[in-house]
Amino acid sequence: MLSSNIKGVSNGFPLKIEVEKVVEKQVEINHDFLRNIFQKIDWKAFFDASKVMGFAELPEQAPDPSVLESDLEFLRKFHHALLELHLEEGALVCPETGRKFPVNKGIPNMLLHEDEV
Amino acid sequence: MKLKQLESLLGDLQQFSNPKVELEQYPTGPHIASRLLYTAENSFDDISNKVVADFGCGCGTLGAAAALLGAEQVIGIDIDPQSLEIASVNAEDLELDIDFVHCDISKLGWRGQMVDTIVMNPPFGTRKKGADLDFLSVALKVASQAVYSLHKTSTRDHVKRAALRDLNASSAEVLCELRFDVPQLYKFHKKKEVDIAVDLWRFVPKKS
């Protein structure tokens, strides 16, 4: 799941992604939604996450929001990276402590041990 | 989608096979779930094209209802792995794309208002006092638009006061009173089925 942008963790953002298996799902493109979510995304984290997941076609610098209106090709890539790539197996890694949160069957396990609370 | 159709689709979902009392796992019935989501969508435009999170999703009924009504992204979060397994089977059965996160709501580390709308049927706090308000507190920090939640009618004044005074709500409104039918799930339940009066709330978080 590539909404790593949405999934900050208490002790450090962004989580790094370790990939074992990525699956692609087809999702219908929705312009209103993409416009809305674009403003909320931490682009650097999103860019890095997409790259680790094997999709390197996004620009490294956050583009101007106007491209959402003019550049269909960009929209398609943005949509693909955001909604169609899912981390099926792997881990999310805390950048500060190196603690790994395993992802099994697409579900990240963010539960903390007792000594981490 | 019509309300009846939504209710009937939700009626086919699997519910807890082995409910855990410490988590106050009670299934959210299709009647209540369909009305909650239908109101959120049709009266307030809080669901379609939105990012919706289902807090303490259990078997995923509310999240599934949000996805059926056109939410663009739905995230179900629960502390119990067995519930999440059932929830993902439910999502698959309905061919819905829902993301699940295995996490304790009170330890959720989201940065700011990352989702638009939260729908939840929190633990009512009968086993663990204050559990419902713990959920609400986190919800009002991470939703930008609205939080829909069910709380016992008997706690109405308390919920309103706490939400407005302590929990970052700019408004707290009871949309309607519903009957939550609790089937005889646990051994300590003496009656076959009881109705509890619950309020359906809509909270609006303060802008960050």
Image: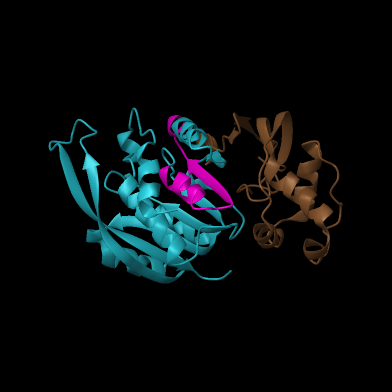
Residue B193 shown left or right of residue B142 in the figure: left
- Please name the residue shown 33% across and 28% down the image: B18
Count the labels in the image.
Answer: 0
**Residue B93 position (above or below residue B3):** above
* Residue depicted at x 50% and y 44%: B76
Residue A35 versus residue B6 in the image, above or below: below
Q: How is the image coloured?
A: by chain
Q: Nearer the viewer, residue B150 or B181?
A: B181
Quarter of the rendering occupied by the N terminus of chain A: top right
Chain A, chosen colour in render: brown
Residue B59, relative to residue B113: is it above or below?
A: above
Evaluate whether residue B85 shows in this view.
yes
**Rendering coords of residue B169 (x, y %):** 45, 68
- Above or below, comparing residue B89 to residue B147 in the picture: above
In the rendered image, residue B9, in percent from the top left (x then y), is placed at 40, 42
Residue A61: x and y in percent read: 86, 56
In the rendered structure, the answer to whether residue A80 lies left or right of residue B100 reads right
Q: Which residues are magenta?
A: B61-83
- Residue shown at the point (49%, 52%) measured from the top left: B69
Left or right relative to A71: residue B30: left
Q: Is residue B88 magenta?
A: no
Residue B46 image offset from top left, x and y in percent: 50, 62
Residue at horizontal 46%, vertical 61%?
B41
> Depth check: B67 or B28 in front?
B67
Specify whether residue B138 is in view. Answer: no
Query: Which chain is rendered cyan in the image?
Result: B
